[in-house]
Amino acid sequence: MISVTERQVEALLFAAAGPLSLDDLAKRLPEGANVEAAISTLVTAYAGRGVELVCVADRWRFQTALDLADLMTEEREEPRRLSKAAQETLAIIAYHQPVTRAEIESVRGVQASKGTLDVLLELGLVRMRGRRRSPGRPVTYGTTDAFLEHYGLANLADLPGMAEMKAAGLLSLDLPPEFSIPNPTGDVVDEDPLEDGMLPEFHVDFLGEDEPTG
């Protein structure tokens, strides 16, 4: 039958955030408690079970038996975190779409960093949607259904408006009177959609710095 000291040691090791030394355990137990004997008994009691009591760097802890470690392996996809530049670019595309890279740079006030659009396209949050009816016929960008799903939006009309953004602290409360939030759901009259076989050819890293060649 397990003793009181053994139960106490077992409880302390089970609840500990990390391994505990004999001194760590002794400090929490009644004076005179035989910690070493309790540990020895517990090691024997847990030997061969799914969870074992082991010593690591002179400290004791419960851990999964080594031969069962493969049961604990889990493969999962970690969400890719967007850089600040990517978040800003995505927000501009969401509210200003359809928008060209030059227009994105104009709104941000800086040149698009290398690879920013590439990341957004790779994640499926942004797509090339058409060509602007202007000299050079630049490609326009817009968001995707995956963007709506990721942010829990039914449609673009559900994007936060000025009042919501102020309430969330994302906009100053004393904006100039002429300030307004772009409406991405309005009619587009200066864009031709991209058709099959009409995707532009790009340099290897055009999504960062280079312009399309076609």
Image (cartoon, rainbow, N blue to C red):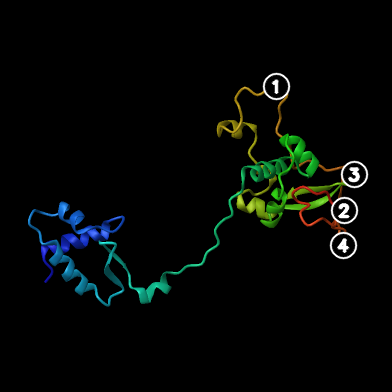
Query: How far apart are the alpha carbons under marks 3 and 4?
Result: 19 Å
In the displayed structure image, the side of residue 133 where residue 41 appears, left or right:
left
Say which of marks 2 and 3 sits in front. 2
Q: Which residue is mark 3?
A: 133
Which quadrant does the N terminus fall into? bottom left
Residue annotated with mark 1? 177
**The quarter of the displayed image where residue 18 is located:** bottom left
State the residue lying farthest toward the front: 57
How crowded is the residue under tag 2: few (<14 C-alpha within 10 Å), some, or many (20+)? few
* First in sequence: mark 3 vs mark 4: 3
Q: Which residue in the protein does label 4 denote?
A: 197
Distance from disc 2 to disc 4, alpha carbons, whole Å, reads 15 Å
Of 93 and 111, nearer the camera is 111
Determine which residue is flagged by label 2. Answer: 213
Q: What residue sits 18% from the left and 61% below the top?
A: 9
Whether residue 100 is visible to the viewer of this picture, yes or no, is: no
Mark 3 residue type: Arg
Pinpoint residue 106: horizontal percent, then vertical percent. 77, 36
Rendering coords of residue 138 (x, y %):
86, 46
